[in-house]
Image (cartoon, helix red, strand yellow):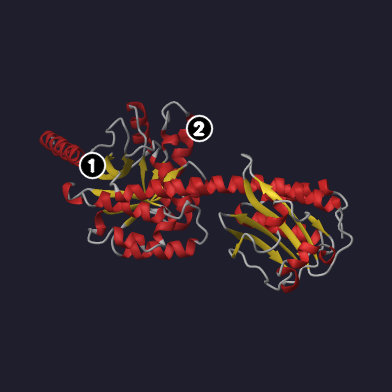
Amino acid sequence: MSVPNAQNLSDAITSIFDEETGSASIDKALRAMRKHLAMDVAFVSQFGGTDRVMRHVDDDGRDLLQKGMSLPLDVGYCRHVVEGRLPGLIPDTAAVPLAMEIPETLSLPIGAHLSVPIWLSDGSLYGTLCCFSHERNDTLTQRDLQFMNVFADLLGDKLESDMHAERQKSEMRSRIERVFTHDELSVVYQPIYSLDDGTVSGMECLSRFRGGFHATPDKWFADAAEVGMGPRLEAHAIRRALAQMDAVPPEVYLAVNASPGLFTSGELARAVEGVDPNRVVLEVTEHASVDDYRRLWNSLATWRNRGMRIAIDDAGAGYSSMRHILDLQPEYIKLDMSLVRNIDSDARRRALAAALIAFAREIGSAVTAEGVETEAELQTLRQLGVDKVQGFHMSRPVPVLQAALLAEQARERAVLASAVVGGRA
């Protein structure tokens, strides 16, 4: 079967590349091409110094070639086609003497063959796009070869894009690995103040990254998640944070961020080993979606039974945090700073915050507002009934000893205030 309209099929394959990602898109497009041309085997091979590797293979089920198989460049048709010794279109291999000299023509067997080179944008040769049938196919024409060339151009763009993405991921992995090997992560602590007496009841532990790559902590953790290193990096940050627990007043808890994936991994257990669980609050973040809330709930129950408490971060910022609240029943709900910002002058923010606070009361959760930057915001949050606050207005994130000093100073002010009130009474 020859291709009636190469442009229509190339448009369909372009659509596949747009809709699918990674290796799956190439495999799907390769199958579409093979079936449309009524061939038995199609493959993409990448040339190396002396070998070629089958990067993608689609066949009729005989498994004559396997993905990842490495063959010498001199084996088969590909090198002969690229170097001009064999034509790209061979409807009948029996009619081409050089083809009949190639052992694979009889061993596979190959009755008809199509092959075109795959060029990258810099003019370098990636390899070849090939397909063959076991029987001769006299219906194959130059239009089929034309389509193969169109497909090879699209494929070159796709492969180049995928290689660029893989290089980026490799760089991410190397950069994150340096965090462990070169001690490039430190922790700062932001006091969380109770509004009932002004004491510091907790501290949020926030990661800071050193090294030549300048990005926000969220970016670091997102990159780690993308390359499969998310739980490991999160656990490392938690371990570093909790290592300073003895420097913090015993009545103060430490809040550490943890994505849903960390709870169901073995990394968290190693990160919190040896610490007092009653002084740890695990803040569930939105770094990853939750596919199975029941499984996450059961995992959280394990940590709760040990004395740890759960907080839902970023409430009011998106759907995921609200779903976390409904399904995980946290001890703490943290109002996102985007909701807190200008809450004193924005009626809509006040209304939403008030609704969340009322909801928290109904389910028995305490509310912490983060990102408090002005006295007006603080007073409005107090009036709305928020339990705890944190933000630049009270303290920026600071090293642990400075945070501990702030906690001690807050406790002394609370004791003094209580004595004054008692004396007046």
Against 62, residue 131 (above or below) is above
Q: Residue at x 23, y 42 (%)?
A: 200
Instruction: Judge from the rendering whether residue 423 lies leftward or rightward of residue 318; answer left or right.
Output: left
Q: Nearer the viewer, residue 234 or 71?
A: 71
The amino acid marked with disc number 2 is Arg
Residue 306, position as x, y percentages in the image = 29, 64
Q: Residue at x 33, y 41 (%)?
A: 209
Residue 186, position as x, y percentages in the image = 28, 43
Against 248, residue 379 (above or below) is above
Residue 367, position as x, y percentages in the image = 37, 45
Q: Residue at x 26, y 50 (%)?
A: 240
Residue furthest left in the image: 423
- In which quadrant of the rendered view does residue 219 lie? top left
Looking at the rendered image, the quarter that the N terminus falls into is: bottom right
Instruction: Judge from the rendering whether residue 224 lies leftward or rightward of residue 90; answer left or right.
Output: left
Question: Tag on residue 24?
Answer: none
Question: Would you call the spot at circle 1 few (<14 residues within 10 Å), some (14-19), or many (20 or more)?
Answer: many
Question: Would you call the spot at circle 2 few (<14 residues within 10 Å), some (14-19), or many (20 or more)?
Answer: few
Looking at the rendered image, the quarter that the C terminus falls into is: top left
* N-terminal-most mark, 1 or 2: 1
Instruction: Judge from the rendering whether residue 228 lies leftward or rightward of residue 35; answer left or right.
Output: left
Q: Which residue is mark 2?
A: 348
Q: Nearer the viewer, residue 303 or 288?
A: 288
Gap in angstroms between the C-alphas marked 1 and 2: 29 Å
Circle 1/circle 2 CB separation < 8 Å = no
Q: Which residue is mark 1?
A: 200
Residue 40 shows in the view? no
